[in-house]
Image (tube, coloured by chain):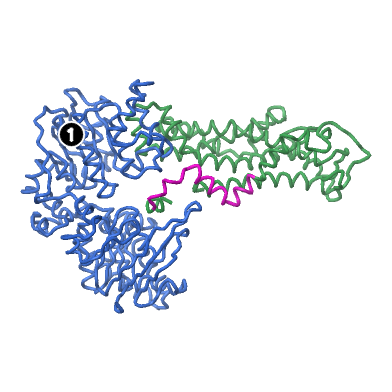
Amino acid sequence: MAAALLDVQGLDVFFTTYGRKRQVLRDVGFSIAPSERVALIGETGSGKSVTAKAIIGTLPNNATIDGGRIALEGEDVLSLSRDRREALKGTAFSLIMQDPLSSFNPVFRIGTHLDDVMRFADRRNGIRNGKAARRKRIAEVLRRVQLSEPERVMNAWPSELSGGMRQRVLIGLALLHRPRLLIADEPGTALDVTTQDEILNLVNRLVEEEGMALLLITHNLGVVRKAADRVVVMHHGDIVETGPTERIMKEPAAAYTLSLLDAVPALFGPKVTDQPESRGVPIVTIRNLDKLYGRRQHRFHAVKNVSFDLRKGEIFGLAGESGSGKTSVARMVMGLTPPSAGTIEIDGKAAGDRRATQIVYQNPGTSLNPRRSVEQTLTLPLASIGMRGAARSARLDELMQLVRLPRSYLGKYPHELSGGQKQRVAIARALAAEPRILILDEPTAALDVSVQKTIIDLLLQLRDELGLTYLIISHDLSLMRNFCSRIAIMLRGEIVEEGRPAELFAEPEHPYTRALISAIPVVSDDEEHLKPKVTETERQRFLVAATQ
Amino acid sequence: MAELQMLDPNEHAVSGRYRLWWRFSRNASAVAGSVIILSVVILAVFAPWLTPHPKDAGMVVDFLHRHQPPSAEHWFGTDKVGRDIFSRTVFGLRISLLLVVGVLGISVPSGAVLGLCAGYFGGWTERIIGGLTNIMLAMPPLVMALAISNLLEPNLFNAMLSITILWWTWHARLVYNVSKSIATEDYVEAARLSGAGPAHILFREILPNCVPVISVKTTLDAAFVILFGATLSFLGFGVQPPTPDLGTMVADARQYLPEYWWEVVCPGAAILYVTLGFNLLGDGLRDMFDVGS
């Protein structure tokens, strides 16, 4: 493999935290040939980001590289001086920033930001470019990332561009000095599905046209299938399996890869689950719901004329991208914000009964108070319904059993729990006062795929055991396909389509539904073929609408 | 930090208390600061037993030994009426610490409660408390303190009172900022949905998350309060003679400069020592808790 662009061999990395040394990468080795696309895939703690950081040279201070070699174009970067290593940035390799929303300083125009980056890189590399020459190159690069009016973009403030546009600018930034290797860490995950899809297409096209190699770091197998030729699967700091994408997806050799693939919810084909339709009576009735925020000129119509019924025992999904109004609807059902117009009835009464509904938040990291133990968190709702002494202690036991956590976890604090465990505690808290309706706000968005599956299974079991009704709001249609008994698609505050998941996926009527479904990255070719077709003009229309 | 925790599946094996201790023991500034403050507290508490001439803290006159330079008998020399300056300095530290405890003991909790309320409730509560805080902060502190002490009789209690009246505003404003941002956290809303009342949310959900910021600020404040108290005494509005106060001692000895320099330098160095201790500890705590300034 003398011709390899990037060659990593026997990489051992340790982290020292609080005086204890722990190995986070064990004998990691892989290589990337020129213009090859390689994906590093793994879950939280697998070491994929550490590997990328070791290559870029941005490991945290408490990290030590105890062995191994990272060669870029035949040169061992670990033995290079700081300056020489700095000089590689931008030219030999370049990094696409992950978070387009926080990567720009809001007080600089986009053009200034790009010019600064280019000027510093030029200085490092001893290139003399005039301001005009730099501006020309920047405009050229912006055109490459399909920003059709580079002048306008350069004069814009970061806040004036949508997330998708800013992500494009960030990709352009990485291209400035024509790198041979592009490193992308979870590209577009902070963006909506449709935008993420666009970004992936763009990266793919650029890599092909410029003949760059790509190192893609992701947890999403669908993204891998779309944008990588070869996959390196990582688990707990080890490389579990390496191989061509096609083979890994079809016949994974390692059990871990198989379990990863199994955890991806299917969209079409034999692996999908159809939740039975509920024949129960409507427990929540929503009619002509409207919500306006702000006053006069700044008025924002978040929810427009939304009506639906939530039947007892069903799992109703509100799907939509950011800004579609799905969260506003959920908050109104919870009684957290009053509707501007329309009615919400729960069990025939106006909403407001605190004990009927409870909510499970998206991110268990922020929905549990870091300074309160599990027991304190769970005791609060019990105390507020007047439960004390032995009854309370018995109920705590019961709750822990319901969410399948050992009783000993009552004494733990959130930082001692994993993401999935935290979400179980959040579910237990929501169930404590025996609500009839649970609102699930992207309940698995912050979790790894395999953990997602266990939480979804738990929620399904709980619904059967306790006779609950769920209202789930999410942008993740693949999750909802298998979890919901009915789905409503929201666009700009309105429900544009509603139906049973099987019907919705087989024959989506509204073009937006089609655009959403076709943007979901899937893991098999069969599913890819079953996706609805969207014309380019249709897609562009919704892209602009949803990202602005 | 957040990123590290994410990468490391075994992170939760380390308990929170151990982490704090680990960070503390490796933070030179925090350790040095605590050693200094501990030494000051021990000296102050056991002053009558640790000082060579405890009686000199009061009204003792020994003109035979006035203005003596530092020696084995009198480490810091003697003052204009022949009292041992070392003993008086140690007793002065006592007054300084008393001032700190008194001022911060009242102004930190009251400022914190007002800040919590303003941040969490918003609306009129926020406007009234915010307005009051801004008005107080707009007044020049020394002038205010002098005015208050002037109205009342100059003594330790009134000096404490005048500083306290000024001091709560800083904590109100600090805690207000923190509590306003924490009030929007999901866990606060979740607690409210679980049926928690405002008292529970303020003191059980929000306050514990303000503790790092409050403790850093309080420690740094302790140094300011000592300086402020010394300034008041120096100007004659604080502790009155013969009670040994560091500021008063410096003021009294000023007229004998430069011949009898030790009479100014020694109590001055004591002020420096204790202030430095609090500042080091405060800085160290800030690094430990990773609190922005």
Residue B159's quadrant in the figure? top right
Identify by letter the chain in green: B
Q: Position of residue A444 (x, y in %)?
A: 26, 44
**Element at badge 1?**
strand
The amino acid marked with disc number 1 is Leu
Instruction: Tell me, yes or no, if residue A359 can be seen here.
Output: yes
Magenta stretch holds residue B26: yes
Q: Position of residue A392 (x, y in %)?
A: 35, 24
Taking depth in this image into account, of B160 and A519 the one nearest to the observer is: A519
Residue A162's quadrant in the figure? bottom left
Magenta stretch holds residue A411: no
Instruction: Tell me, yes or no, if residue A301 can be seen here.
Output: no
Residue A131's quadrant in the figure? bottom left
Residue B289 vertical placement versus A73 (above, below) = above
- Magenta residues, as a range? B8-34
Taking depth in this image into account, of B112 and A276 the one nearest to the observer is: A276
Q: Position of residue B29 (x, y in %)?
A: 60, 51
Q: Chain of mark 1?
A: A
Mark 1 = which residue? A289
Q: Residue at x 83, y 38 (%)?
A: B52
Identify by letter the chain in blue: A
Residue A78 vertical placement versus A14 (above, below) = below
Q: Residues within 10 Å of mark 1 (few under 14, many from 20)?
A: many
| Horizontal relation, residue A224 to residue A46: left or right | left
